[in-house]
Amino acid sequence: MSMKTTFLQARAALDAGERFAHAAMPEEIARSWQRCLRVGLEPGGEPVDAVISYQELQLARQQNERLMEIVRPELELLSSQIAGTNYMTAFADANGTVLDAIMDAEFHAAECSRSVRPGSIWREDLRGTNALGLALFTGQTSMVTGPEHFFTRHGGVSCVCAPIFASDGKIVGLLDASSEVSDRQYHTKALVSLAATNIENRLFIESHRRDYIIQFHPRVEYLATQSVGMVSVTEDGYVTGANRSSARLLSGMNFLTMNRFSDIFGGSFRSILRKLIQGDTVELSDGLNASYFARLRPMSRPRSGRGPAQEVTLRAPRLYRLEPQEQELVFDDELLRECLRVARRAADVGQPVCIHGATGTGKTAMAEVIHRHLHPAKPLIVVDCRRLTQDTDMRGVIGELMQATAPSGLSLAQGGTLLLEHVSALAGLAADELNVLLDSVRRDVAAGHWYVVATDQPHQDQTHIRTRTIAGVNMLTVDLPGLKARTDFDKLARIMLTDLSSQHQLSAKALRKLASMERPGNLNDLRHHLQVLVASCPAGIVRETQVEHFFPSHQSETRACGRCLGVPMREKRCLEVRRVFQICQCNVALTARRLGISRNTVYSHLKD
């Protein structure tokens, strides 16, 4: 008897008011059903339509205003990353009340959208088993698919929810993704978990701006990823907080009894901090003799002086220095190499360059390569024009950059490169003053100054190299190709994967599958897809079936492998192996144990 059949029997028993078999479903679902029964809920009944008033909703949003500012970009990104249609993403507070939601037109037209709306409360005791209520109760990322919901009327929806924790270990919110399509949920679960981690790390950084934030990980290449552990400490070595990854990395150690940095890691804290402040990567060992690499988080340095300067913080910095990328930059595409060649020559003679391309086509990376060619020993300073208001004094911004002792520590007084990102976002007075800004930098070419503009602003001329006028200044413009048009995808994907994990490799078919996917965010989306695969797949070769599992195409369907196709008995066994493989989240070893077969047998059925 298949797992699906036994579950359906348990579901039928629940609907009939009879005892159901706990072993026929995930343990957390069975326990949730029992809790629902204990509070008097009936699976065939109507869930409580618990909704707070408009005034209460506004008050809850005000109380969570800063958190929502951090959550909203992740919510929008999550919405854009969920493949297909008929979906909704939502953010709920620590009480299980939905404060914000994004849904597409198809989901908005469905009956479910009238239940899952801002102001609705999704606690388990009111709405029965659902991902949001389950995550709130267990503190774990939860997935509830179709008939796993307690109430029968929720059986057509599948949902995933991840809790968001503050640095003190308390749940401050929940991130949810719901859809009437269930075959994407394992992929969605990885996306939601990553988004929640991003939010938690930003919250941690926000909460400990006045502390030193030390990042650590057993592998040095992971120090630039979201899986890094972070511990905040005072100048005297007292621990003020740690993110969730720290608890995972330091498993076996009790944080609650550790008040000082020296309680966690060996060595002199003063000596370690001195090296970290100098920008060094330091090797640490914990009380269990496990080894880690550590570095100080950029811009993580408390201000000890007095006066207004110590209050200057950039929650979303509009000015920052771009440090050299450690990852190898790939420019093996012929069109891309031609753009780089022309842009370098233009920079050599002091010609301003506009790098045009869609989101994630590598505009900033190309600017960095040109900057290294032009004057590698000097700074590359970025102005993010999206962070400038209509009334921003652009001349004041650039004037500060030209000071030898700029308050921000960012100076082009001795020469360097100025990169204006997202220049099309400028408006109002700031846009009017852009001409003055560019002229002032252009006149200083002899002093070693050069500037470059990056924009995704639409244009009529589709020629990949041409002249363009921005704010009255003639620029040489190069158009970067999208990822779909590049001929160096295989090398690019392999190097990007190596940067994320040296333990994973892509098979040839997996590469072809990744190359065929649509990616509006180009390199950004590719990196995200690889992050999902690294986080979800065991070390080794990532195969096409795993890519298809986490990023299914609309045309995909379960079929037997070529060796078994056409032989009914073998087809049936092959389909069972593939089905269990999907349930086990593409883990070959777990699939083999579940079915009582060898791993080689599992591999043989996964070949196309």
Image: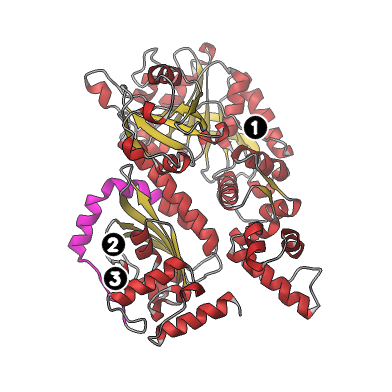
Q: Nearer the viewer, residue 394 or 523?
A: 523
Q: In whole angstroms, how far apart are the C-alphas of marks 2 and 1?
A: 45 Å
**Residue at image location 47% in from the left, 40% down from the top:** 249
Judge from the rendering whether residue 62 lies leftward or rightward of residue 461; answer left or right. left
- Mark 2 or 3: in front is 3
Name the amino acid, label 3.
Asp
Q: In whole angstroms, how far apart are the C-alphas of marks 2 and 3?
A: 13 Å
Q: Earlier in the sequence, mark 2 or mark 1?
A: 2
Q: Main secondary structure of the magenta part?
A: helix
Q: Name the image quarter holding the N terminus.
A: bottom right
- The correct choice, above or below, for 379 with respect to 334 in the image is above
Say if residue 426 shows up in the picture.
no
* Disc 2 packing (10 Å; few <14; some 14–19; many ≥20): many
**Residue at image location 32% in from the left, 83% down from the top:** 45
Magenta residues, start to end: 46-73
Residue placed under numbered mark 1 in the picture: 328
| Furthest residue toward front | 288
**Residue at image location 74% in from the left, 55% down from the top:** 509
